Image (spheres, helix red, strand yellow):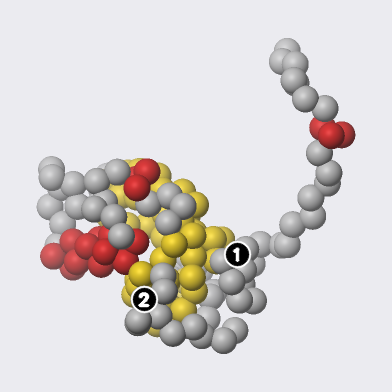
Amino acid sequence: MFEMNFDPDDFPSVESEPVSYEPLEPGNYEVTITDAEQKMSANNKPGVVFKFEIVDGKNAGRRHSEWFTYPANNIVVSDFVKQLWADFCRAVGVKGTSTDEFVSRHVVMKIKSHKMNANGYPDYKINWLPANSPGFVDTPF
């Protein structure tokens, strides 16, 4: 049996907003990268799951995640995958050599459109822009 070294009553109850699973509408969303975790896909390809939190607008506080196939040296990936990775790294302002580089950074997620996949989840078409870049035009929500 374990013993807690704190009293739960010392912490106030936190009521959080319900998580929305509705697709995000097309538009610009400034996000903070809250986590970046290397994983293997179902097809045994290396990748990184990025977790984001929207920082403003009507969706402030909403969480979102994206899978990026990682262009590792021992895996053959298309130039398309390499370009997506390069665009994301440039927007975030990192080289992309470690997942730790990404955490706590801000970036703009520009959702152009989405369609529902076979599992009932949205597949988004996303461009990535540096936060506060000239290409970032705030979209009213």
Tell me the quarter of the picture where residue 110 sits. Answer: bottom left
Q: Which residue is mark 2?
A: 133
Q: Nearer the viewer, residue 73 or 57?
A: 57
Which mark's residue is nearer the viewer, 2 or 1?
A: 2
Q: Which residue is mark 1?
A: 62
Tell me the quarter of the picture where residue 66 sits. Answer: bottom left
Q: Residue at x 35, y 73 (%)?
A: 129
Indicate which disc residue 89 carries. none
Mark count: 2
N-terminal-most mark, 2 or 1: 1
> Which secondary structure, mark 1?
loop
Q: Residue at x 56, y 66 (%)?
A: 55
Examine the rendering and report whether any part of residue 27 can be seen.
Answer: no
Assign the N terminus to one quadrant of the image. Answer: top right
* Residue type (three-letter) at the residue carrying disc 2: Ser
> Which secondary structure, mark 2?
loop
Residue 37's x, y, as percent? 40, 44
Q: Residue at x 37, y 51 (%)?
A: 102
Q: Is residue 141 above or below residue 81?
A: below
Residue 136's x, y, as percent? 40, 80
Residue 135's x, y, as percent? 35, 82
Q: Nearer the viewer, residue 47 or 100?
A: 100
Neighbor class of circle 1 (other Cα within 10 Å; few <14, some 14-19, many 20+) is some
What separation in Å lies between label 2 and label 1 (alpha carbons)? Answer: 22 Å
Tell me the quarter of the picture where residue 111 sits. Answer: bottom left
Neighbor class of circle 2 (other Cα within 10 Å; few <14, some 14-19, many 20+) is few
Q: Is residue 30 above or below residue 93?
A: below
Give the left or right position of residue 120, taking residue 11 as reference.
left
Residue 82's x, y, as percent? 18, 61
Give the left or right position of residue 27, taking residue 127 as reference.
right
